[in-house]
């Protein structure tokens, strides 16, 4: 059975189908990203008969309605949105939303004498040889005979009417040009659609299952899907660019009047940058916590009305699925939910987005928070479970591979079992004594500064309010928030000069600390025993060298806060390996104490 059909249809038919609602252009690529020159080049290619690529449409499944009738699914344009929008902008005069979220026209001009296109400007408007706006030529009320006569008269081209007329006919024939259309069958699964799209797309653009799900939502005009799409889209945009709030509200008058805007407008006043979700994140969290499923393919099927047992597509299921998704989205964007979840995240020591390499860790944390809240658990218990699960997930790389499958499994287990019992069972299996005493110590033997084990160590320092190395007042938290630098305890150049010239050896994370830049500069390339001798002199009141520590007990406390052994103060190159081995043990113990304090 063919999985897709390849046909061709005229541009005019495509535009007519879009106007009639038979083909939907979902707004998952906002704003219109092409500039005027690309629209001009596309028109030029069409005029010259050059190929402009296929468009890909995916037919929604037919849905059986409550009265027994069949509602035939519309086609969704999943590839070619920018090209079709550009054609509509030039030929029909469609307004587009630009990068500043303002409605504007992209006006393409045409010179019938030289047969060239250009983006309209004031000089062209004053030049009688140009047609400033080609959409006028495509208008049904355009009088070609009158235009040609007037054009030739104004430009001194008496007797050239026939040539100009032929040129205009060639221009208007663009509407009749056939485009290749790949129509994906409604019987295809989301996995098959994703695979086919990747294989046949010639632009190298990879759409995810979340993109296809958003296409399904955005193209819906029966169950409130498009408004839900706008809630997601605008919420994410406000998170990144709150200054665009007035532009978007001024542009989208209909949405500005909706209750949906009221639910998300708070975010335009926030300055949060730890958890900045994109629409795929919002979609995953909203769907998973409400439906207790983790696979986006299931969402696509449910929005299509899929009955997984009978394999029918029923309107009642589609209606309920769109309703439930809306509930999930509203829970995600709710100010209280979002802000309280962020407080839990920050309480783990995550004070900067750089401390979390996997967005799915934070996504599942929010899924868990919303799910436990729905079950009515005490807020203190929710905080404890979510906090520990976030850190456990980072330490074990839980969502680094097969994330969707793991999310699906975890949400089901948290739902089917007592949440605290499932957490403790997971801790017993994955965070045993063997993990803390052996596995974690070994995993700390890496040179990757973005390693989750080092990041969790930094989180532990933040949570314990540890100070930077050799600092009296400046905390690790402050250094991270101010995007300070990580420095080598055994200076890199010192190690290199003494034969440790392999990057993996001198860049060991057990050789890393956060410290003030001025301290690092003063240490230069000295051996630890050299610069720490100066530190001892400072403590004894014999000079000021690094930071402001002037008490030996305070110095020992500072070393402990950074998991640096006291013996380090007398070490040189011959002690480097011993130092790394000792510090890894100390870091692992420090992380364990931190984790156990999260309960």
Image: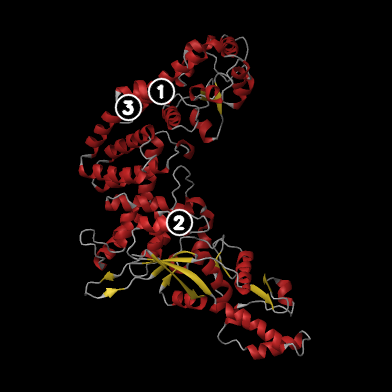
Q: Which residue is mark 3?
A: 596
Could you tell which of marks 2 and 3 lies nearer the N-terminus?
2
The image shows residue 73 at horizontal and vertical percentages of 34, 70
Residue 418 vs residue 301, the one in the foreground: 301
Helix, strand or loop at label 1? It is helix
Disc count in the image?
3
The quadrant of the rendering that contains the N terminus is bottom left
Residue highlighted by disc 1: 442
Question: For the residues carrying marks 1 and 3, which lies nearer the camera in this image?
Answer: 1
Residues 525 and 471: in front is 525
For image coordinates 29% across by 60% down, the residue present is 302
Q: Earlier in the sequence, mark 2 or mark 1?
A: 2
- Which one is earlier in the sequence, the residue at label 1 or at label 3? 1
| In this view, 424 is above or below 490 | below
Give the Cα separation between the discs numbered 2 and 1: 41 Å
Q: How far apart are the alpha carbons under marks 2 and 3? A: 48 Å
Residue drawn where x is 46% and y is 25% of the image: 466
The relative height of residue 441 versus residue 215 in the rendered view (above or below) is: above
Residue under label 2 = 199
Label 3 sits on a secondary structure element that is helix
């Amino acid at each position: 059975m063919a999985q897709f059909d390849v046909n061709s249809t005229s541009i005019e038919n495509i535009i007519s189908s879009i106007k009639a609602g038979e083909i939907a252009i979902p707004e998952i690529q906002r704003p219109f990203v092409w500039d005027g020159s690309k629209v001009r080049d596309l028109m030029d290619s069409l005029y010259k008969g050059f190929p402009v690529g296929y468009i890909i449409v995916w037919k929604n499944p037919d849905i059986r309605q409550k009265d027994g009738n069949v509602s035939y699914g519309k086609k969704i344009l999943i590839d070619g949105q920018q090209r079709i929008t550009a054609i509509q902008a030039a030929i029909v005069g469609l307004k587009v939303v630009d990068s500043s979220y303002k409605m504007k026209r992209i006006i393409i001009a045409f010179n019938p004498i030289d047969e060239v296109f250009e983006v309209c400007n004031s000089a062209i408007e004053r030049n009688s040889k140009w047609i400033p706006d080609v959409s006028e030529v495509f208008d049904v009320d355009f009088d070609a005979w009158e235009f040609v006569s007037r054009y030739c008269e104004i430009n001194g081209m008496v007797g050239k009417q026939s040539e100009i007329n032929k040129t205009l006919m060639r221009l208007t024939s663009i509407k009749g040009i056939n485009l290749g259309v790949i129509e994906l069958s409604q019987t295809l699964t989301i996995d098959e659609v994703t695979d086919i799209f990747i294989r046949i797309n010639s632009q190298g653009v990879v759409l995810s299952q979340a993109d296809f799900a958003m296409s399904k939502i955005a193209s819906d005009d029966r169950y409130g899907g498009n408004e839900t799409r706008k809630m997601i889209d605008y919420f994410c945009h406000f998170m990144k660019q709150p200054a665009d709030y007035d532009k978007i509200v001024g542009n989208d008058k209909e949405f500005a009047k909706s209750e949906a805007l009221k639910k998300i407008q708070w975010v335009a006043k926030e300055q949060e940058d730890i958890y900045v979700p994109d629409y795929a994140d919002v979609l995953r969290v909203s769907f998973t916590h409400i439906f207790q499923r983790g696979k986006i393919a299931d969402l696509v099927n449910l929005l299509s009305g899929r009955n997984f047992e009978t394999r029918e597509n029923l309107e009642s299921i589609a209606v309920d699925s769109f309703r439930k998704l809306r509930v999930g989205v509203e829970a995600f964007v709710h100010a209280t939910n979002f802000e309280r979840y962020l407080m839990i995240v920050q309480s783990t020591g995550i004070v900067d987005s750089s401390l979390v390499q996997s967005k799915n860790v934070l996504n599942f944390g929010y899924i868990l928070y919303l799910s436990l809240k729905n079950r009515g658990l005490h807020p203190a218990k929710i905080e404890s479970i979510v906090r520990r699960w976030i850190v456990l997930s980072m330490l074990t790389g839980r969502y680094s591979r097969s994330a969707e499958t793991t999310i699906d499994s975890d949400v089901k287990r948290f739902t089917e079992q007592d949440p605290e019992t499932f957490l403790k069972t997971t801790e017993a299996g994955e965070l045993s004594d063997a993990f803390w005493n052996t596995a974690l110590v070994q995993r700390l033997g890496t040179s990757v500064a973005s390693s989750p084990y080092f990041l969790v160590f930094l989180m532990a320092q933040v949570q314990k309010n540890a100070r930077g190395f050799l600092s009296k007042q400046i905390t690790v938290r402050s250094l991270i928030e101010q995007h300070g630098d990580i420095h080598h305890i055994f200076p890199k150049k010192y190690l290199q000069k003494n034969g440790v010239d392999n990057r993996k050896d001198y860049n060991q994370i057990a050789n890393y600390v956060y410290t003030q830049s001025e301290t690092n500069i003063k240490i230069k390339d000295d051996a630890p025993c050299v610069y720490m001798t100066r530190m001892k002199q400072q403590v004894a009141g014999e000079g000021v060298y690094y930071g402001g520590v002037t008490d030996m007990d305070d110095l020992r406390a500072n070393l402990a806060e950074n998991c640096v052994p006291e013996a380090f103060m007398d070490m040189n190159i011959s002690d480097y390996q011993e130092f790394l081995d000792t510090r890894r043990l100390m870091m692992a113990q420090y992380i364990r104490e931190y984790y156990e304090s999260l309960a």
